[in-house]
Image: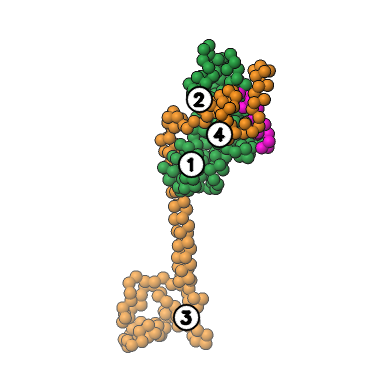
Amino acid sequence: MSFLSRLRARRYLDAASAEALLAGRGVPAGAPADQRDLARLLEIAAKPGSEQELGGQVAAAAMFVQVTSQGKPRKIARRVLAAAACATAVAGSVVYASAVPSPHHKMAPVPFGVPAEHHTVPGPAVTRVPSRQPGRRQVHPQTRSGHRKIQQAMNPGVPLRAGSR
Amino acid sequence: MLEREFPGVLRAAATGDETAFARLWRDAHPPLLRYLRVVAGDAAEDVAGEVWLEVARRLPRFRGGEQEFRGWLFTLARRRVTDMRRYHARHPVRLTDDAGELDRPGADDTAMAALDNLSTEAAVALIASLPRDQAEVIVLRVIAGLDVGHVARIVGKRPGAVRVAAHRGLRALAARLGQRVTR
């Protein structure tokens, strides 16, 4: 670049003209030739996208769909997990509350089937041990008298058979 | 620039609308590609793809208007190029070779005739032949359509320094074009 060229450019292209070019406002009609050429050059450089530049649009859209679809399942899974955790916590607290025995009862295995109202033969497993109340003797199911008392307590309207155990 | 349509298009794209994203891409990809040709040379396409991937991931969290979006887009691009340069420190990025061809004026053509036949790629290559800081701010101002403030934030300089670099670059370009006229 020669000294005269640089001098000419500096003289004609002041700050205001330069800003007008950079902002896309072009140059006034009577501007020097090199400024008009400069405006034309910048105009060409800022043209709308060519077909070649826009040729990757399909790939870009496919990338976008893949990225956004990867994000959604994670969100859904997180919500499902959070809901399941809450449900488990609530259900667990209900089960716990119903399963915890009263401090006055002892846990005992429940026999199969529903005992008949008037069965006289004691079940193979101990069904329930009566709670011990202060001031009363504990009734032992293995003794005859104990069994009778239990039977009477379970079936108040059924008379005891003679000889029943 | 989408201007008035930008807020609606951005909102739709942020919620996963593929068509809206395509509009953003069509509007901003050519300027992005041209900027990357100036600062990243042959790696422009690859870097542009990485930039759009990051945009797609972070778009739902973006807040701002069109200038802010472009500023964000080109900031991401510049960071990618910086990372790339550091990684490939032993292999300098080569700019396009068209600038050399343009510097040599034809035997009978006038400057305007030559400019009328000038392709966008060649015009960008001519800008890219300037010193890197001057070329970068001219591309961001003229091709990306960003104002001085946003350009300053992208390149990490004061607005005054950005203006000085841009004006020097324009004078250099004008002088080259003036040389073509006088010969």
Above or below A46: residue A113: below
Main secondary-structure element of the magenta-colored stretch: helix
Q: Amino acid at mark 2?
A: Glu
Q: Chain of mark 4?
A: A
Whichever of labels 2 and 1 marks the residue nearer the N terminus, that label is 1
* Foreground tag (4 vs 3): 4
Q: Amino acid at mark 3?
A: Ser
x then y, percent, for residue A26: 56, 31
Seen at 50% across and 26% down, the residue is B120
Residue B36 is at least partly visible in this image: no
Q: Amino acid at mark 4?
A: Gly
Q: Is residue B159 magenta?
A: yes
x then y, percent, for residue B155: 63, 35
* Foreground tag (4 vs 2): 4
Query: Residue tagged by mark 3?
Result: A131
Above or below B44: residue A115: below
Above or below B159: residue A145: below
Q: Are marks 4 and 3 on the same chain?
A: yes
Which chain is in green here? B
Question: Which label number is shown at residue B2?
Answer: 1
Is A117 positioned to the left or the right of B181 in the image?
A: left
Q: Are marks 2 and 1 on the same chain?
A: yes
Question: Which label number is shown at residue A150?
Answer: none
Query: Residue tagged by mark 2?
Result: B121
In space, the residues marked 1 and 3 are separated at their CA atoms by: 82 Å
